[in-house]
Amino acid sequence: MPMELLCIMTYNCTISIRGDGIMFAIGLVGPFGSGCTYIGKWIQENREYVLLSLSDELRTLFKEAYPKKKATRKELQNYGDHIRKTHGGDYLAKLVWEKIQTDTTKNYIIDSIRNPDEISFFRRHCASFYLFGVFAEPDVRWKRVHDIYGVYGKSVLSIIS
């Protein structure tokens, strides 16, 4: 069993108490390449949670603002900083929360949380919000980044640093 899934396996209790009408939201945080998205997809497929991503919201906003520009990691980071400065640190969390409010009968995984204001927002708005940190050894992260993005050497180090 991959190390990243160890803490998730102890969280099976949400299925048995789901009948109480309590919505659960699990937030995933971790460094680039740590496996947050992998774990989020695993929970989605095996525990019937809905997976939402703050990064997906950011990519959508970026494409709307710059339809002809390539959304590189650096461009998205800069645009995310701009969005947080102009709309507040919890802006992306608010966008995801609007989606959650359309169906509060489901449980949610929230991936790509990057800012303390986003965590605070979910803690204030969701009574059953649990935050999990996901970590992986640098060589594991390097391999994942390489496999996904096809970059090598110093490029990988600059991405995961």
Image: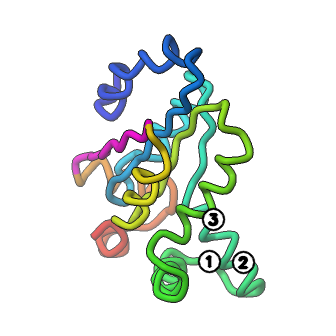
Q: Which residue is mark 1?
A: 71
Locate residue 118, reporting x and y percent.
Answer: 43, 62
> In the image as oriented, which residue stretches furthest toward the left?
137
Q: Confirm or deny contact between disc 1 and disc 2 (CB under 8 A).
A: yes
| Secondary structure beneath label 1 | loop
Q: Which residue is mark 3?
A: 57
Counting from the top left corner in percent of width and height, residue 40 is at 50, 39
Q: Quadrant of the N terminus?
A: top left
Which residue does the image show at 76% across and 87% down from the upper left? 68
Which comes sooner in the sequence, label 2 or label 3?
Answer: 3
Q: Is 65 on the left-hand or right-hand side of 77? A: right
Give amino acid for label 2. Lys
- Quick one: 93 or 32, which is closer to the camera? 93
* Three-letter code, disc 3: Glu
Q: Residues within 10 Å of mark 1 (few under 14, many from 20)?
A: some
Query: Looking at the rendering, in which quadrant would you find the C terminus?
Result: bottom left
Residue bounds of the magenta highlight: 128-137
Relative to the observer, which residue lies in front, 63 or 159? Answer: 63
Q: As displayed, is residue 34 above or below residue 41? A: below
Q: Nearer the viewer, mark 3 or mark 1?
A: 3
In percent of the image, x 30 and y 28: which residue is there? Answer: 7
Magenta stretch containing residue 85, yes or no? no
Q: Label 1 is placed on what type of residue?
A: Ala
Dot 3 or dot 1, earlier in sequence: 3
The residue that disc 2 covers is: 63
Q: Residues within 10 Å of mark 3 (few under 14, many from 20)?
A: some
Residue 156 spot, x, y in % from top left: 35, 68
Query: Residue 134 versus residue 156: which sits nearer the camera?
Result: 134
Residue 32's x, y, as percent? 37, 60
> SS of the residue at dot 3?
helix
> Real-space Cα distance between discs 1 and 2?
8 Å
Q: CA distance from mark 2 to mark 3?
A: 10 Å
